[in-house]
Image (cartoon, grey):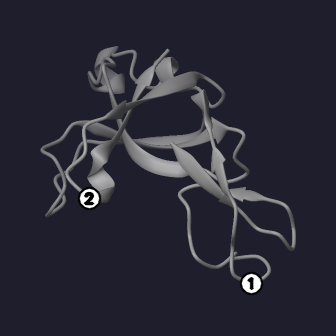
Amino acid sequence: MLGIRCEACGRVLAPPRPICDRDFVETDGWVELARPARFELFTIMYLAIDGLPEPPYVLAYVRPDGADTAIGGFLEGVDLACPEAGGRAADDRRPGHESRVRDERQGRITDLYFKLA
C-alpha cells in the first residue's frame, strides 16, 4: 500500500491524493506504508443502505503504519451479533487494535477490507 507525502507539512497521506487537504499544495513523493494498521474508529451497520453490502457489516477507519491519515473500508472476520443480544462485535474492535489489509482489487473504494490481527 502506498501513501504520498506533502512537502509543505511533511504528512504522509493515505489514501494518496493530488493535493494536501491541510496546505492546499500539490503532493509529491510516494511512500510505502507498512502493515499492520491501527483502528481509529468504527461503526457497526445493522440497517441497509443502497449500494453497500447487506448488513450487518463494520465500516472502519484505520491508519497504516507510516501514515498520518486514516483509510476507510470494511472490516471482516468478526462476530457481528447484535450487542443487545450478547454479541461481542463492539468489544472486538476497540480503537488501537491492529488490522491487516486484504488486496482483492476491482478498482473501487470497496476493494479495501481489513481484518483483526
Give the residue pinned by disc 1: 25
Badge 2: how crowded within 10 Å, few (<14), some, or many (20+)?
few
Q: In the depicted view, which residue is nearer to us: 45 or 73?
A: 73
Q: In the depicted view, which residue is nearer to us: 68 or 18?
A: 18
Residue 32 figure quarter? top right
Give the residue pinned by disc 2: 108
Q: Position of residue 77 (x, y in %)?
A: 30, 19
Q: Residue, x 55% and y 48% (percent of image)?
A: 2
Q: In the depicted view, which residue is nearer to us: 60 or 114?
A: 114
76 to 13, vertically: above or below: above
Q: In the depicted view, which residue is nearer to us: 115 or 54?
A: 115
N-term-proximal mark, 2 vs 1:
1
6 to 3, vertically: above or below: below
Q: Secondary structure at mark 2?
A: loop
Q: Amino acid at mark 2?
A: Arg
Q: Position of residue 78 (x, y in %)?
A: 34, 19
Q: Position of residue 117 (x, y in %)?
A: 50, 14
